[in-house]
Each structure stands twice: as structure tokens, then as C-alpha cells.
Amino acid sequence: MRTEKINPRYVELDSWSVAEMIVAMYEEQLAAAAAVRGALGAITAAVEDAVPALQRGGRIVYAGAGTSGRIGVQDGSELPPTFDWPADRLVFAMAGGLDALVRSAEGAEDNEAAGAQDMANANIGANDVVIGIAASGTTPFTIGVLRAAGASGAVTIAVANNPDAPLFQVARHRILADTGSEVIAGSTRMKAGTAQKIVLNLFSTAVMVKMGRVYRGLMVDMRARNAKLRRRAEAIVSEIVRCPAGDAARYLEQADGDVKTAILIGFGVGRVEAAQLLQRHGGNLRSVINESTGKDG
């Protein structure tokens, strides 16, 4: 596996100065980002397949072991605060359970049956989107997850860093970030992990945009649950409605903190009508604004 190979450039790494090490590792991080470019088409196809399933009420499932599993949990955990994605529409299948997020459970990744059982326990179905992440692409637990999810008709996506990874054989969508060997041989928390995070950022953000949770580059589905987010919500309403911050705060209060409703109130739409419009348009603010105000969204 390319991710396990020794890179001749770094065999004397431990004899280098700190400055030399930092430069070398930085350069490899840039290479990790560049490796994702070749996967952009596969990411696009996965997003286009995932969105209709999620529009039918499906869930997003992240599955993996070790670093890969932790990166998946990190990506998924950010969806509720950023996009108000419902927590009950997120599933995390971590080899060894969620305790393995902070305490290594390395033997758990070898259990393919456990991965399949996690999918059975979650009642995975055709509207669910299951993302299996493994740098090596050989992790039995993650293979078990995708094999079982695929048998249930789910949209299955494999993210791996080695060409011809077995993980790709059990997934509908195959996203390869070919990062090659690491500065420290086999330490896939470095380049491979960086590339995985980029892939998941691209995938999940594009999905949320296409689900109507972003408008004009702003997170209009976020919920103002603390002072910082209230200020952000006011700024979003003010920017879109083109109104003073004080007016934006008032619209948000009238909308009980719902940013989309507050925006429509700012455009002169009644609160009840705003809720009805948003429901009719599946929460797509651009479509609602075009219909209700005549403005070019």
C-alpha cells in the first residue's frame, strides 16, 4: 500500500533540525490538498446522488476506525450548528464505539461483522447516505459497514487513499485521494487524514448548499443559540434584507430566531405566510424570495 511505504526523502528525518522538519511536513500537507483535485469528479457524482436521497428524509452516516473515523465524526458533528442539520439524521459508526474517539480501540477495526451489525442496528435503508472512510482502504470494519449498507439499498461512498482499495469494491461511489507515502511511514493521521478532511468538507458543504441551507454564501439555516451566533444571525439578516442591525434583531425576535423567516419578514412577508412559503419550497430561500417578493434571488 502506498500509504505504508517508506519515503526515501525522509529516512534521515530524525537527524534534521526542527525548521527542516516543519518545512518538509508543510510541503507534504500541500501535496495532500493537491491530491484531492483528482477526486473532484467523484465527489461531485456522490453529492448529486446523495441529495435526492436526503430530500426524501434520509440520514448521513459516517463510518470508520481510528483517525479516519474521528475525521468523519468531526465533519458530521459540525453539520447541526452550521446548517441546523437534525441530529437525529446523523449516524456515527465508529469501530470500538464512540469511546474510541478519545481512547484507541485498534483491534475493533478488524471486525467486519461489527460494521455490518452497526448498520443493522441503525436500520439503514435506501434513503440513507453512508460514507466509509479508511486511509488504507482495507479496514474490515468499514468494509462491513459499506457492504451491509449497500445491500440495504443505501447510497454508499468510499473514501480511501490507496488505489484499488478493497473498500472501493463495496461502494457505489469511489473517492480516491491518492496521497502516497507519509513523512513518517504509515502515519496516515498526516497527509491521508488531511486529504480525507478536505474530501468530507467538500462533500458535506456541497450537500448542505444543494439542500437549500445556504443562500448567497450565508448559513441561513443556522440557529442563534448563543451570543456569537445571535450576532452572526443579525449580520446575515441585515446583509440580505439590506437593513440596519437593529431592524434585523427585531425581525429575528419576531421569527423566534429562525433566520430564513426573519429575512422574509424583513421583506414584508407575514410570519405565517413566510412559514407556509418555506414549507412549500422545501426550505429553499432563493425560490421563496423569487416568488414572494419579485426580487431576483
Image: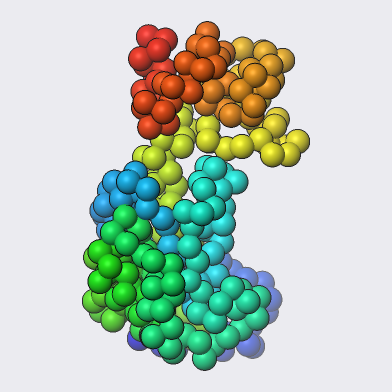
Q: Residue, x 37% and y 9% (percent of image)? A: 294
- Does residue 38 sit above or below 14 in this rendering? above
The answer to whether residue 121 is visible is yes
Q: Quadrant of residue 144?
A: bottom left
Query: Percent position (x, y) of residue 114?
Result: 43, 83
Q: Residue, x 68% and y 22% (percent of image)? A: 253
Nearest the eye: 127 or 29: 127
Q: Is residue 167 left or right of residue 258?
A: left
Q: Residue, x 52% and y 8% (percent of image)? A: 268
The answer to whether residue 29 is visible is no
Q: Quadrant of residue 256?
A: top right
Query: Percent position (x, y) of residue 52?
Result: 29, 46
Q: Residue, x 46% and y 35% (percent of image)? A: 214
Q: Quadrant of the C terminus?
A: top left
In this figure, what is the number of numbered marks? 0
Q: Quadrant of the N terminus?
A: bottom left
Nearest the eye: 231 or 288: 288
- Does residue 23 sit above or below 143 in this rendering? above
Nearest the eye: 115 or 123: 123
- Does residue 223 sit above or below 42 in this rendering? above
Query: Percent position (x, y) of residue 83?
Result: 52, 42
Query: Percent position (x, y) of residue 21?
Result: 61, 76
Q: How is this picture coloured?
A: rainbow
Nearest the eye: 194 or 56: 56
